[in-house]
Structures are given as C-alpha cells and as structure tokens.
Amino acid sequence: MSETESGSDLAAVRTRAVRDGEDYRLTGSKIWTSHAHRSTHAYVLARTGSEGGKHEGLTEFLVDLSSPGVEIRPIYDLGDEHHFNEMVFDTSSYRPPGSSGSPATAGSRSPSSSPSSAAAWNGC
Ligand SMILES: Cc1cc2nc3c(=O)[nH]c(=O)nc-3n(C[C@H](O)[C@H](O)[C@H](O)COP(=O)(O)OP(=O)(O)OC[C@H]3O[C@@H](n4cnc5c(N)ncnc54)[C@H](O)[C@@H]3O)c2cc1C
C-alpha cells in the first residue's frame, strides 16, 4: 500500500491501474514492502478512478510479482539487513487472475474475492 507520498494518508495513492480491454495497465511504485523479494504475489492498492473524493476510485489488485514490468528493488536497513523493498510497476498489460472484468463500485467490497481471484474493493 505505502508510497513515498502516501503513508498514513493512504488515500493519496498515485499508482494507477488503467483499463485496457480485459487487462489493466499498472504504473507507479510502492515502498517499504516487507518481504516482496520472497513473495510470489502482492496486494497492490491502485487508483482506478478519478471521479469523486480521494477515498473513492481505489481498487486492490492481487499481482503476480513475476509478471513482466514488475521490478523488486531491495532497500537495506542500517544493519545491512534486507527486509524492505521498493516495487516498481510498468506493466504493458496486466490481467488479474480470475478477473471478472471490472473493479468493485465505490464503497463496495467484493465478498467473493479470494487469494486466487482478483481482489477488488473500494472505499478502503
Ligand atoms: C516494520 C515496517 C514494515 C512495513 N511494511 C510495510 C509493508 O509491507 N507494506 C506497506 O505498504 N508499508 C509497509 N510499511 C510502511 C508503513 O505502512 C508506513 O510507514 C506507514 O503507513 C506510515 O507512513 P509513513 O512512513 O510515510 O509516515 P507518514 O505518513 O509520513 O507519517 C509520519 C509521522 O507523521 C504522523 N502523521 C501523519 N499524518 C498525520 C496527521 N494527519 N495528523 C497527525 N499526525 C500525522 C504519523 O503518525 C507519523 O508519526 C512498513 C513500515 C514499517 C515500520
């Protein structure tokens, strides 16, 4: 979820997911992502709409981190330990696994979302 200008103020998220047919184009970056270098997938909060307040138009995607255009950059702490990462997204085409096609409407939650399907909910 976290971005450089979006920590406590999560609704300031700037990572975007733009619909491209059945797919999405995901662009932006996340920071402080714990253990992304050891993970196969990550939940990524992205802006999918620009209408309404800043708490609207947000969708969470379950992203396969091996997808083309996904880069995991290590961040080393003062003890030279590697727990955190920056995740950079510039996917030309990302299809959420099991996607039903469209993000949940503002304020709704998708109860059928499971780890194997596209997790999408707004109004977080
Ligand atoms: C051990 C660790 C693991 C983490 N792992 C992850 C992870 O896996 N994924 C992920 O997305 N993020 C992760 N984070 C990041 C974490 O979620 C953010 O640090 C957190 O959201 C705060 O954001 P920030 O660091 O940008 O601080 P800021 O939002 O800049 O806040 C800085 C300070 O200002 C205060 N503050 C902010 N806004 C206000 C306000 N309106 N009024 C009063 N005080 C305010 C805060 O309380 C804080 O003390 C991790 C952080 C840590 C420490």
Image (spheres, rainbow, N blue to C red):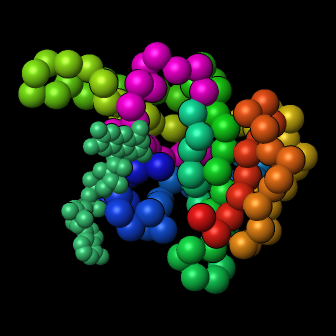
Residue 65, located in which quarter of the rendered image?
top right
Residue 28 versus residue 114 in the image, above or below: below
In which quadrant of the rendered image does the C terminus lie? bottom right
Nearest the viewer among 107 and 90 is 107
The residue under the point 85% across, 41% down is 99
Of all residues shown, which one is farthest toward the right? 100
User: Is the residue 113 above or below the residue 35 in the image?
Assistant: below
Image point (66%, 57%), residue name: 59
Span highlighted in magenta in the image: 25-41
111 and 120: which is toward the camera: 111
Examine the rendered structure and indicate whether residue 79 appears above or below residue 116.
Answer: above
Residue 29 x, y percent position in the rendering: 43, 44
**Left or right, 43 with reference to 115:** left
Residue at the (64%, 34%) spot, across then down:
63
* Residue 37 place in picture, x, y as percent: 43, 19
Does any portion of residue 43 appear in the rendered image? yes
Looking at the image, can residue 69 be seen? no
32 vs 1, left or right, is left
Is 2 included in the stretch rendered in magenta? no
Q: Is residue 36 magenta?
A: yes
| Left or right side of 24 for 100 | right
Ligand 1: which quarter? bottom left
Does residue 9 lie above or below 66 as drawn? below
Which residue occupies the extreme front position in the image? Answer: 111
Residue extending furthest bottom? 52
Picture quadrant where residue 50 is located: bottom right
Q: In the image, what residue occupies the spot 25% across and 28% down? A: 75
Number of residue marks: 0
